[in-house]
Image (cartoon, rainbow, N blue to C red):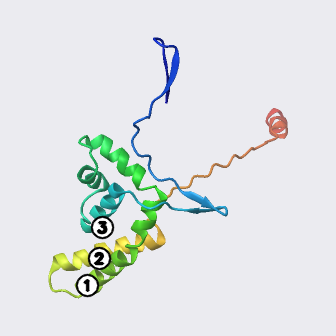
Amino acid sequence: MILYSNEDKTLHNVPQNTPERPPMPIKKNNKVTNRPLTRKQEAFVKHLVENPKASATQAVLSTYNIDNPKTASVVAAQNLVKPSIVTELAKYNNLVENTLINTVNEYSQSDKQWERSLAVDTSKYIHDKIHGKATQRIEQQTTGVTLTIDLTSALETDQA
């Protein structure tokens, strides 16, 4: 940043103290490659993987220097669409899928009601992830009908 001083009428070059910008994708040969994760982003991903019941907002609150939950939810939403973070989280998809499938296989024949219920809920979740969530759609169709009735012959017979 360059500042102008009125006292000695000279320009001064002042270094700017700006926070580190988040990594942006690097283009090489028209291909987008992801930059490496920052330390905070790595901690964010690690918190999400190690605490599956925690939300992304909770992960931001524990890893970033943020106290406000609304700000944390915005940062979490921004993080979850960054290509480098999405790529890192995708590495754990196989682990998640295997855990879900093992849960269904293990609990589907259980004597305990809550375990069978968990197996059913998990299998529904897997089904929805693979085939999409079922939605109810109501379709409406309107048809217009135009009738033309010639009543002249009916008037002639009434008058006769």
Query: Which callout, 3 or 1, points to the residue nearer the camera?
Result: 3
Alpha carbons under labels 2 and 1: distance apart: 7 Å
Circle 2: element type: helix
Q: Which residue is mark 3?
A: 49
Sequence-first disc among 3 and 2: 3
What's the residue type where badge 2 is placed?
Val
Give the x, y percent position of residue 87.
46, 66
Disc 1 secondary structure class: loop
Residue depicted at 27% across the width and 78% down the height: 119
58 or 10, nearer to the observer? 10
Res 115 seen here: yes
Q: Which residue is mark 2?
A: 120
The image shows residue 140 at horizontal and vertical percentages of: 57, 52
| Residue name at image x 48 percent, y 13 percent | 8
Cα separation, mark 3 vs mark 2, equals: 24 Å
**Crowdedness of circle 3 by 10 Å Cα count: few (<14), some, many (20+)?**
some
The x and y percentages for residue 96 are: 34, 75
Image quarter of residue 134: bottom left
Query: Quick one: 86 or 33, which is closer to the camera?
Result: 33
Q: Amino acid at mark 1?
A: Ser
